[in-house]
Image (cartoon, grey):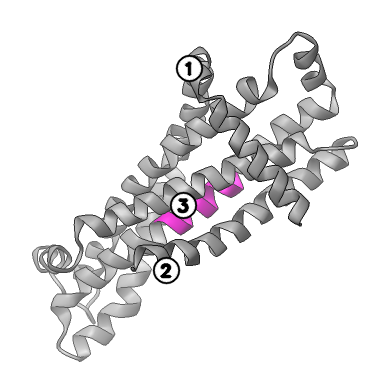
Amino acid sequence: MFQNIGEIALLFWRTLCALPFAWRQRQKVYDQFFEIGNASLLMVCVLSFFIGAVIALQTGPVLVERSLSSAVGGIVGISIAKELAPVMMAILIAGRIGSAMAAEIGSMRVYQEIDALRTMNIDPIHYLVLPRMLAIAIALPLLVVFAILVGWFGGAVIAEANSRIGVPFQAFFSGLRDIVEVKDVANGLFKSFCFALIIGSVSCHQGLATLGGPRGIGRSVTKAVVNSIVLIVIFDYILTRFLLK
């Protein structure tokens, strides 16, 4: 475990050192950004809408029974902005994009394409890892912004449509504005940026560390997704403690 953590930290440091060469890989960054961002919008929309709807269904009736209907929008808004949108989108991207990164790089490692890059004096960090890290670090926070807005809309729809809640759109967003501040959304975006770096580092490391044939690629994909999710949850607690100070 400690060896893997050290290797991931070293890979992340080497990627940071390669940032001055990012402009040369701009087309690959754009291609990865399109794959991560645009291709994930539909799933993000569906997931975030129903997350907001579920939070409204769970909290709305309880708050209305205690004459706190004005707080429904605020509770839904702050829970999505600070916690649910960053964490759930990170888990979604870890499963969809992290697995793809590990599989692509792992296949290149197994079939000796990475050795061929080194033979041609091409650094795999510059060519493979850096574009993926930059793309996911930009795309995930943008997806979280989209998820927050769609989640708020989903909560507002259910809050008005459900007879046990019955909070109109205007009252929902009025309560949301009273409780949710800009720093709450900023905290969620900062979390998502950190989660993106975790997913990119872990997935690329597992791909580069792949050994064996197709079975080795499968193990790397599994490890990439599982380790990313575990680290996301651990760092979610650490970042929350840090941001609450």
Q: Is residue 129 visible?
A: yes
Left or right: where 194 falls relative to 110: left
Outermost residue to the bottom: 66
Q: Is residue 166 visible?
A: no
On screen, residue 29 versus residue 203, left or right, reads left
Q: Which of the marked residues, 2 or 1, is nearer the chain's N terminus? A: 1
Give 15 or 36, whichever is nearer the viewer. 15
- Is 88 included in the stretch rendered in magenta? yes
Is 50 or 100 nearer to us in this picture? 100
Residue annotated with mark 1: 26
Q: As shown in the figure, which amino acid type bears the numbered disc 3?
A: Met
- Whole-angstrom CA distance, mark 2 to mark 1, is 36 Å
Q: Which residue is mark 2?
A: 241
Amino acid carrying mark 1 in the image: Arg
The residue carrying mark 3 is 89
Binning the other alpha carbons within 10 Å of mark 2 as few (below 14), some (14 to 19) or many (20 upward) gives few
Residue 60: x %, y % from top left:
26, 78
> Could you give the CA–CA distance between mark 2 and mark 3, rounded to whole angstroms?
20 Å
